[in-house]
Image (tube, helix red, strand yellow):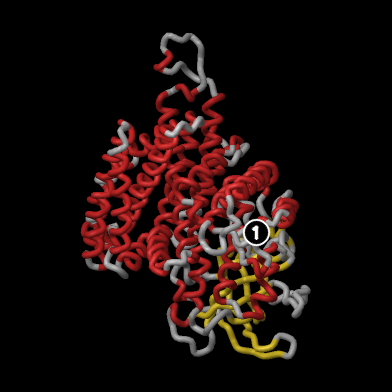
């Protein structure tokens, strides 16, 4: 159950896919120099390996518990969180004005991957706090920023998202939590929040001295549906004007959910009973504001798919190197028994895990880079273009990467054979932990509907066509690189993007119901082709480096070989996905009473 961050791989992706040099040239990011990137990645890797990774399996066994109204996290979590705060890890991308380091999101992305690979249940707490910081930076009042942001950035306080309720599920328009205006000398103009929230990740815990909840609720006479929602800041402890902790707010943890995985992460049912809160931004714009947190969280959940896949791959690879069983066909004349990594099918499984993880990683880092360009590029047109690309890719990163993460962790169990199905090895935990990622922060079906119903519909597929044009350019460059492997990669990519163009034209023109019925296979097609694009770009970069005399020949040759495997085993199936995208009629014609 050891973990070593793939720092060389991460650095390569930052340089060749995300374009960290171009990111560092953006206004305000000048401090993101190569030496700094190298140093911080190295220190983060040490922290992940030494302090977080050893917690993963023991914390899964013990879980968080609710005792006499108090949520207690597993042994070692409090000490690890204190080290996390002391190291300033939560401040990387926050504004300098509030104690942050002002670094690019792109740069923080591999570090977040490390935390999630090392111990995903622990990493969920900083993930939600980071989202709360983004929310308040964008929409908080000056007073809210002054009082809360610095403490959230430092990690002294933690943040949460409070969206769904027992009757609402994913339908946020069905939320019934109430927010009644009130006024008191001590708290000024505020609201009294009443209602129940479920599935609240780190809704209560013993890591930070205060927890700041972002709560969706309805003010009196608010219109029905999602348009009537407002957003409120509700602290666990009510601070005075200097931030000193005051009385406990009227927020109670009723229970902790009993879950398939991420046992160490306390998932709470919270009851608000006239809890004091303050509105964030304007009335009835709560869902719009909450999407700031949700989009941030969706990128990070997609990154969780990458992270858990990496952890599962490392464990499966190390097991295959040491597990001796049978005599491989390729070593028929050898009388020795050899580790199972010599078996062709075991190597196929490991390569499928590796190729999928590298494709996911590159796509997630690239999406983060687009967000940085959208925020900081001095060219207004470039900002708009980058934002459209990021908007298009966020649902793909969230859904495709998490589905692939589940597939990779399942394959990791298969590599272990029967030992993988036994909890002691830890392989099963990766699958259990991964299984939530296609569900929370908007199920993957919702992501597919968002991709087709909003992102494609708003510009009639223009952003998707621009993406396809970039992919075609990479396919052409691959075919022209005077390499048999790159030519094969380019040909597979060209066929894949042609399928993507055909499917995009179909869902753009189809009526809403037919498009929705084909939206999930469409997203999977886009993800598969984008993954192939990322792998082709990495193979091209490796080819150029080898031609330039780069001495790291083993790493670079493996890059090309892995990209070729992806082309042969993943991209090869892209053309066949078009039929599923077009198969919506069969879905709609199958009546509910026929099931």
Please indicate, yes or no, whether residue 572 appears anywhere in the rendered image: no
Q: Secondary structure at mark 1?
A: helix
Vertical placement of residue 223 versus 486, above or below: below
Residue 11 visible, this angle:
yes
Q: Residue at x 49, y 58 (%)?
A: 299
In terms of depth relative to the viewer, which is nearer, 317 or 429? 317
Q: Nearer the viewer, residue 421 or 335?
A: 335
User: In the image shown, does 563 or 440 lie closer to the viewer?
Assistant: 563
User: On the image, which quarter does residue 70 sit in?
Assistant: bottom right
Residue 317, image x, y percentages: 52, 31
Residue 219 location, quadrant: bottom right
Please tell me in which quadrant of the rendered image residue 444 appears. bottom left
Residue 119 image offset from top left, x and y in percent = 62, 48
Q: Give left or right: position of 451 versus 78.
A: left
Q: Residue furthest front?
A: 548
**Which residue is under mark 1?**
90
- Locate the N terminus and report the quarter of the image it occupies: top right
Local crowd at mark 1 within 10 Å, few (<14), some, or many (≥20)?
many
């Amino acid at each position: 159950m050891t973990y070593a961050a793939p720092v060389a791989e991460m650095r390569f992706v930052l340089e060749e896919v995300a374009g960290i040099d171009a990111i560092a040239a953006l206004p305000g990011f000048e401090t993101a120099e190569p030496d700094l990137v190298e140093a911080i990645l190295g220190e983060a890797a040490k922290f992940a390996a030494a302090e977080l990774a050893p917690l993963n399996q023991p914390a899964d066994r013990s879980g968080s518990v609710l005792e006499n109204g108090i949520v207690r996290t597993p042994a070692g979590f409090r000490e690890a969180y204190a080290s996390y705060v002391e190291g300033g890890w939560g401040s990387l991308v926050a504004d300098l004005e509030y104690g942050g380091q002002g670094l690019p999101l792109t740069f923080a992305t591999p570090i977040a991957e490390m935390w999630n690979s090392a111990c995903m249940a622990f990493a969920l707490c900083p993930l939600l706090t980071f989202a709360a910081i983004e929310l308040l930076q964008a929409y908080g009042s000056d007073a809210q920023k002054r009082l809360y942001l610095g403490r959230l950035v430092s990690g002294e306080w933690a943040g949460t998202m409070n969206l769904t309720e027992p009757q609402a599920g994913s339908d946020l328009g069905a939320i019934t939590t109430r927010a009644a205006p009130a006024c008191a000398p001590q708290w000024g103009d505020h609201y009294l929040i009443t209602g129940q929230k479920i599935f609240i990740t780190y809704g209560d815990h013993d890591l930070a001295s205060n927890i700041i909840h972002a709560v969706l609720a309805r003010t009196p006479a608010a219109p029905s549906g999602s348009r009537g929602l407002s957003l409120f800041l509700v602290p666990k402890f009510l601070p005075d004007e200097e931030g000193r902790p005051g009385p406990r707010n009227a927020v109670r943890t009723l229970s902790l959910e009993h879950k398939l995985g991420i046992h160490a992460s306390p998932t709470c049912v919270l009851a608000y009973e006239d809890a004091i809160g303050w509105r964030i931004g304007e009335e009835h714009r709560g869902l719009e504001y909450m999407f700031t947190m949700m989009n941030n969280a969706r990128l990070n959940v997609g990154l969780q798919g990458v992270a858990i896949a990496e952890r599962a791959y490392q464990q499966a690879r190390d097991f295959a190197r040491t597990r001796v069983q049978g005599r491989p066909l390729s070593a028929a004349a050898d009388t020795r028994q050899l580790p199972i990594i010599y078996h062709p099918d075991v190597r196929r499984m490991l390569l499928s895990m590796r190729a999928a993880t590298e494709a996911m990683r590159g796509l997630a880092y690239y999406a983060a880079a687009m967000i940085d360009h959208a925020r900081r590029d001095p060219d207004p047109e470039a900002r708009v273009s980058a934002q459209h690309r990021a908007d298009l890719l966020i649902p793909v990163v969230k859904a495709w990467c998490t589905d692939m993460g589940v597939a990779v962790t399942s394959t990791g169990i298969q590599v272990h054979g029967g030992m993988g199905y036994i909890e002691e090895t830890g392989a099963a935990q990766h699958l259990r932990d991964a299984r939530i990622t296609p569900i929370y922060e908007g199920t993957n079906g919702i992501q597919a509907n968002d991709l087709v119903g909003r992102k494609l519909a708003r510009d009639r597929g223009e952003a998707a066509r621009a993406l396809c044009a970039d992919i075609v350019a990479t396919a052409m460059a691959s075919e022209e690189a005077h390499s048999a492997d790159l030519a094969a990669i380019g040909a597979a990519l060209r066929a894949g993007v042609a399928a993507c163009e055909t499917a995009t034209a179909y869902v753009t023109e189809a009526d809403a119901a037919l498009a929705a019925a084909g939206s999930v296979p469409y997203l999977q097609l886009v993800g598969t082709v984008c993954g192939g694009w990322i792998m082709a770009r990495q193979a091209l970069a490796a080819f150029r480096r080898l031609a330039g005399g780069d001495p790291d020949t083993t790493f670079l040759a493996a890059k090309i070989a892995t990209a070729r495997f992806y082309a042969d085993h993943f991209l090869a199936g892209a053309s066949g996905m078009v039929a599923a995208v077009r198969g919506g009629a069969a879905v709609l014609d199958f009546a509910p009473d026929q099931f």
